[in-house]
Amino acid sequence: MSSLNDLVTSIGADLSREEINRLHVLVSDWQVLSDFALADAVLWVQGSDGRYMAVAQCRPGTGATIHLDDVVGLYASPMRAAQLKQALNESAPRYAPELRWAGSYSVSEVHVPVCVEGRNVAVCSLETSSQYV
């Protein structure tokens, strides 16, 4: 499995060493966030081509996971990419306008911009089964 550094570098993201280090700090302690939210947490970074790649993922220990397979290293779908782009350009969490279907269950998403020294550098999506919402 590729590291966060490797993935960010491979997509040509416009991030400084300090910004990447701050993303490491976030993911080193985000199990608590995932557990409290009863949600999978996925960290998305925009590459030089404008696409968004999942560079880190955390599953909740307090509820069911949404992603049975790892999403790290995968690109966001065009619909999700549009939502991530909106979140990256805002300063507050953004709720996905509609539930997304994943097989036989629906998923609720919140997109939270990750800000480092006044600049949004990534988006953390919190994805949970609608049965918990």
Image (cartoon, grey):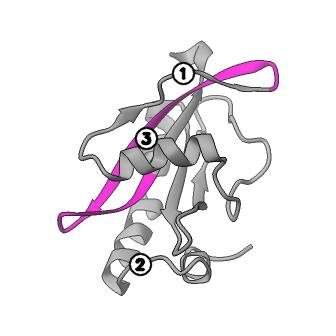
Q: Position of residue 10 (x, y in %)?
A: 62, 82
Rendered residue at 63%/52% (across/down): 76
Tell me the kind of residue under disc 3: His
Kind of element beneath mark 3: strand
Which marked residue is nearer to the observer: mark 3 or mark 2? Answer: 2
Kind of element beneath mark 2: loop
Q: Earlier in the sequence, mark 3 or mark 1?
A: 1
Q: Nearer the viewer, residue 91 or 25?
A: 91
Q: Is residue 83 above or below residue 51?
A: above
Q: Which residue is mark 2?
A: 14
Instruction: Report the Cα–Cα distance between label 2 and label 1.
Output: 30 Å
Instruction: Report the Cα–Cα distance between label 3 and label 2.
Output: 20 Å
Residue 101: quarter of image:
top right
Q: Are marks 3 and 1 in contact (CB under 8 Å)?
A: no
Q: Which residue is mark 3?
A: 111
Q: Position of residue 1 (x, y in %)?
A: 74, 73
Q: Residues within 10 Å of mark 2 (few under 14, many from 20)?
A: some
Q: Is residue 70 magenta?
A: no
Q: Which residue is mark 1?
A: 98
Tell me the kind of residue under disc 1: Glu
Q: Is residue 24 above or below residue 110?
A: below
Rendered residue at 69%/65% (across/down): 73
Q: Nearer the viewer, residue 25 or 43?
A: 43
Instruction: Report the Cα–Cα distance between label 3 and label 1.
Output: 13 Å
Q: Position of residue 119 (x, y in %)?
A: 24, 65
Residue 127: quarter of image:
top right
Q: Position of residue 79 (x, y in %)?
A: 60, 40
Q: Which residues are magenta?
A: 103-123
Q: Residues within 10 Å of mark 1 (few under 14, many from 20)?
A: few
Q: Is residue 109 visible?
A: yes
Tell me the kind of residue under disc 2: Asp
